[in-house]
Amino acid sequence: MDYIPNIVFAIVLFLGIGYFARNVKKLSRNIKLGKDVDTSDNKSQRWNNMVRIALGQTKMVVRPIPGILHIIVYLGFIIINIEVLEIIIDGLLGTHRVFSFMGGFYSFLIASFEVLAVMVIVAVVLFWIRRNLIKLKRFLNPEMKGWPKKDGNLILYIELVLMLLFLTMNAADFQLQQMDAANYTKAGAFPVSQYIATFFQGLPISTLILIERTAWWAHILGILMFLNYLYYSKHLHILLAFPNTYYGKLRPKGQLDNLEAVTKEVQLMMDPSADPFAAADENAPEPEKFGASDVMDLKWVQLMNAYTCTECGRCTSECPANITGKQLSPRKIMMDTRDRLEEVGKNIDANKGVFVPDGKQLLGDYISHEELWACTSCNACVEACPVSIDPLSIIMDMRQYLVMEQSAAPSDLNNMMGNIENNGAPWPFNQMDRLNWSKEA
Amino acid sequence: MENELKVPTMAELTAAGQQPEVLFWVGCAGSFDDRAKKITKAFVKILNKAKVSFAVLGTEESCTGDPAKRSGNEFLFQMQAVTNIEVLNAYEVKKVVTACPHCFNTLKNEYPGLGGKYEVVHHTQFLKQLLEEGRITMEGGRFKGKKITFHDPCYLGRANNVYEAPRELIQKLDAELVEMKNCKKKGLCCGAGGAQMFKEPEKGDKDINIERTEQALETKPDIIAAGCPFCNTMMTDGIKNKEKESEVAVLDIAELIAKAEDL
């Protein structure tokens, strides 16, 4: 009978991690729906970016208040995970505080977890106030209504509850240690929970054990549930920020890719020896679609970008179009891309691994023409993103589809392009007049 | 005509068996837009005074394709690029200077992949170099104590990380450089980029250039300095909208230097 908790724990752990692994596989499959792109270059620069931007949080602190609060939660998350390791070992082996053999260092660890837990609670409360009471503009954009708002708050609530459970567990343990309860050997230092323990004074050992065990189980179950919540929330950034900063754009922000398919066509057009009357090669593959109208037309890095976005809205708050009341919001571009990708993924799941056209696409059903044409390509969104997401690249790919596949540019732009074709300038001036300025007084 | 500009073309120099130190890429705005032509002329006056050996392509120059590419027309962009690259390569151009950050970005970043590899500098970088080499001197007297705020062009700043060259030039004028609330990496776009220059804006609460002009006016400047012909147009329109044209001038860095030198 003594082994029942261990067996239950092992099963719960297996289910929790197994279900998460299943979702990670789905995530990876969905990301791979994107087009391939060679990212094998500049490995050292890429590692450097990951260490600096994701691990070092350098872009978070560009805005100091949320930046520092975020670092607290981030450190809390990473460091308190050492405690989770102990909980897992204890759960599987039936031990109690298996790391306590470390003595003084163990006390130091537990004490620092407790201090961090309090700091995380403070940070989470401040984050909640920022989201719900202060009315920061970037949390009030239309795309934040409904689920995204709930999602953001839910994450804060879960983090708060997990920290409180951790402290409650320690408080009960501390009280049990004071009472010399069996199995509760004196270990650890409890600079915070010793004060919570004062509420437990006078409770019998059996009740305290019940409190300690309940908090212990609820804490680990909560963590496993949170792990599995990630995939369904905006919170995947805690994992994806690392690969996303690694695979982020390295070239100057102003440099857009040159479409290779177009280069081939242009070379053929400029080649004087090409036979203009040559019959089309019947075996030639279907010409590649230009630009993007749906998620499968984007590159996999762009799709990973979409899953990485945690909807902080720094991009949107710096976007000149959004600031001046236009519909475009770079954050919405990322959220739409992710939501459509999820829809496509579910379609594939429901149809035995094959995507069955659903009459929908990213362009039009999620992202409107008006949003796309409002972009000034100023790169403010790209600069603002703390995890190297590039919303501009998606906007540009979708403009390519609109113009090259659908000829659906605004008429002013069609005039501009007509002028470039006819006279080599965006305005209707004769190329032969290009040097006239030099003769004008 | 003492002030006549000396503007040799690549065709003329090549015919005379000469190769200039640098090609001045004028750009469409610099060639055709009445306001931007003044910037072009100011820059040429400085080049003439510093006796820089340069040439322009003149009628052989064509749009780099930037607005086409940013509109999504990759075909038109690459047609323009390949045509321009043929001309540039035929003249064996090594170094290009331009007063337009859009041309600068396209020539510097997007032409190499299509066979056009040149050293490309923005005119503020080039002017800074001339100053450092002692080829131009700047007497700040005329702008001494004037408050100048610099509007970062997106395609110079964020797109290519050039923030200091224009600022150093302004400081050399003995002027007081004041920064807007959004500057450098966080600079706010003037509203012209991404081919917006050539279309009406989408509907919203206000135009982007008005927002940016308001930020500039908050610094109470005497002059708004720009480094891009399109930003210049947008900021000039913004100042007119605010009816401040008698108090605040919008000038390119090249114009500031030319004025300081009484050119």
Image (spheres, grey):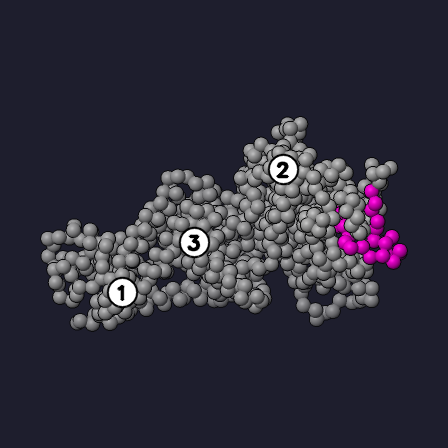
Question: In what element is the residue under mark 1?
Answer: helix
Q: Is residue B10 magenta?
A: yes
Mark 1 vs mark 3, foreground winner is 1
The residue that mark 2 highlights is: B175
In the depicted structure, whether residue A91 falls above or below residue A322: below
Q: CA distance from mark 2 to mark 1?
A: 60 Å
Q: Chain of mark 1?
A: A
Disc 1 marks a residue whose amino acid type is: Phe
- A213 relative position to A249: left or right: left
Whole-percent x and y of residue A323?
53, 40
Q: Which region of the structure is painted magenta? A: B5-27
Q: Label 1: few (<14), some or many (≥20) within 10 Å?
A: some
Q: Chain of mark 2?
A: B
Q: Chain of mark 3?
A: A
Tell me whether marks 1 and 3 sit on the same chain: yes
Q: Tell me the quadrant of the picture where the N terminus of chain A can be found.
A: bottom left
Question: In what element is the residue under mark 3?
Answer: loop
Q: Is residue A242 magenta?
A: no
